[in-house]
Image (cartoon, coloured by chain):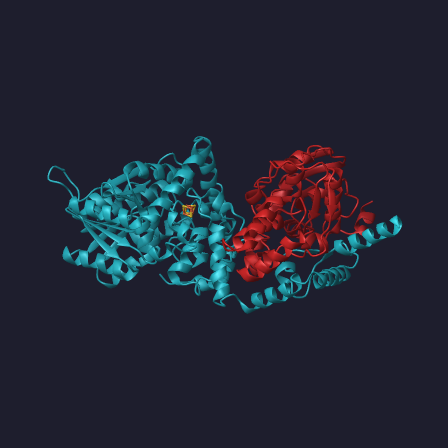
Chain colours: A cyan, B red
Amino acid sequence: MQIKSPQFKENARIALHNVELQEALGQFKHGFPVNRANAIKRLPEFEDLRDEARDLKNHIIQNLDIYLEQFEDNVVKNGGHVHWCSTAEDANKAILDICKQVDAKTITKGKSMVSEETGLNEYLEANGVRPVETDLGEYILQLRDDHPSHIIAPAIHLNVNDVSETFHEHHKRPKTGDPQALMKEAREVLRKEFVSADVGLTGANFLVAETGSTIIVTNEGNGDLTQTLPKTHIVITSIEKVVPTLEDMSLFLRLLARSATGQEFTVYNTLSTGPKRDTDQDGPENFHVVLVDNGRSEMVGTEFQDMLRCIRCSSCMNHCPVYGAVGGHSYGWVYPGPMGSVLTPKMIGIDKAAHLPNASTSCGKCEEVCPVRIPLPKMMRHWREKEFEKHLTPKTVRFGIAGWAFFAKRPALYRWLARSSAWFMSTVAGKKGRIKKLPLAGGWTDWRDMPAPQGKTFMDQWKAASSAKQQAEK
Amino acid sequence: MPNPTQNPKVGLFVTCLADMFRPSVAFATVKLLEAAGCKVEVPENQTCCGQPAYNSGDKATTADIARQTIEAFDGYEYIVGPSGSCIGMLHYYPDLFEENDPWKKRAEDLKSRAYEITQFLTDIVDFDRINAAFEGTITYHDSCSGLRQLGVKQQPRKLLSKVDNLTLNEMEEAETCCGFGGTFCVKYPDISNRMVSNKTQYISDSGATTLVGGDLGCLLNMAGKLKREGKQIQARHVVEILAGMTDTPAIGEAEYELANEL
Ligand code: SF4
């Protein structure tokens, strides 16, 4: 996927002027967050579960190697294969190799953000394998040559008209604006793909070390058809998804569904434990797990370690006022919103993702709703610190901070600065109480008035009053 | 809860915006603290809490300012200020120093003494003898740091409920960020504008004639937008209302406008 994060500002500007996108975002704001709030009201122990999940995740990250090896052992015992891939390229190559082994021409795909991260579709296409997305949102995006703008509702930026146009163009059927009819149409087209695919590829929400199982949760059931019908099932996922036991997995499933969509439980929770056994009636003959690192293990032991707790529920972006204003594509790469603003700099480089951790008011809403209590604003600030250390912070900002700091470290000079600024602004405002246009402050006054200072600073007034009092006492 | 002495000695953390834009907010804070029996002083050597540096990733400068602030407020039983965001910044000071740095302990100590004004009045000195009246309907914006970092939510509402004749109409999304975010509003002005526009819509939908909040940054932002949109809604800091000091023009308004309105 082409990286557009350096153009964040421009992307955001376009998004803010896109009427249809703004409409979609407006509706979206009243969906997931409201459902989540209601779901939590029905589960009084939700806050305790969050603590438990945070602690468990911390334990897992500390012992990542142990649980991953246990997971691998059990996958192998069940007759499957594990491929360790330290980079995105390694993962793509491993998957292509498997496809070649089974002479695959077509692979059906359940939704997988890790495969977006590795750019798998483009890679497979370039190497003669045709990927077919089977999640409805992803399918629509694939037809449009588009990318997800949200990690669980990938086509949230589109409306029914867009889908109708796209289907009409690709399916060559009469146009319809009825969502039910569109869904039926997609189902009919995809059925054929499910049955004829050589390989089925899914992601995984969790990996269970004690059983060597992978699990995906979907609301469409497409994952089940993707993984049970073809002869080969490949799971592509990342290393931090491992959990020790099935019991632990259920803790995360309870948090995940509620935090994501406000459901008690996702509709389909599908576990895969190795290939088809002799006694099984159906299932894949080959089972592969492609475990992607792509920078994650480097985060262990750093100030970004907490980010590895993320269970990709999307709650942070669903509640983020910046995401709500500009949508997911503005962030310019795979992962949008607050979690993306922490992960993307790690994955594509802070130089390219420099805007993302800065484009936040640090309002803290994301941390408030994160089921595993990731201190997202703090992580974003750590990136700002890195930028500052590496001199990536824009010169104007550095210069501004240095100038301001010179005064802030000298109280007497600071008094003078406050006094002169207050005087200057009150003079500009005249008798009006506010300023419509202020030199060098266009960022403010292009959009809103600048309320004028009352006049003398508090410090000056306080000092004058105190000395008058002292005089009187004498 | 700490057990305050009878007449605790309080150092006022003025905050830059109150100092420069709205001294009446600092005076109102002093008035409330004195009404609650505190002995208030204003340490000379305070400047800014350091947020501009902290949020820009300049940890070294932030630490310099933190040391200066810690020293300025040495010896005060409490540090109280009219801003959740600046007091919240004081609460971040311990994170600036390494474990074995003696400044870390001093920062922890400062943190344990630093309170936002409504929180201090309600939770620490249990003061609610508010002697004020306000004619009109207000709506309250919960500023982010105060709300999420310090837990300021019920305190201002509890105090406002003691103000005669005042009606509080809660707006939708009172807890959603107004888009100020310090330097955010000038670095990403169009995103900030969208956020504050959403906010002013909710404010006017609430039917209130006055917007009240506990942080001048947010209030300047929202008042500036309300004015630009030509909305007839005033904006005031909560302490002005609690201290009964509403004879000064509202934020972004001037004396002569008051005269014209009369
Ligand atoms: S950071 Fe937290 S809220 Fe955001 S997707 Fe990850 S787990 Fe969910």
Left/right of residue A195 with respect to residue A15 in the rendered view: left
**Residue pictured at 38% horizontal, 39% vertical:** A257
Q: Residue A290's x, y, as percent?
A: 24, 53
Image quadrant assignment for residue A402: bottom right
Residue at the spot x=44%, y=30% of the render?
Answer: A42
Residue A132 seen in this snapshot: yes
Quarter the N terminus of chain A occupies: bottom left
Say which of B141 and A207 sits in front. Answer: A207
Specify whether A165 is left or right of B54. Answer: left
Depicted A78 relative to depicted A463: above or below? above
Q: Residue at x 79, y 54 (%)?
A: A463
Horizontal and vertical percent for residue B59? Answer: 54, 60
Report x, y in % for residue A462.
78, 52
Where's residue A118, x and y in %?
Answer: 31, 58
Pick out the residue farthest to the left: A278
Q: Quadrant of residue B130?
A: top right
Give the total number of marks visible in the rendering. Answer: 0
Task: Report the side of A86 relative to B207 (left or right).
Answer: left
Q: Is residue B169 visible?
A: no
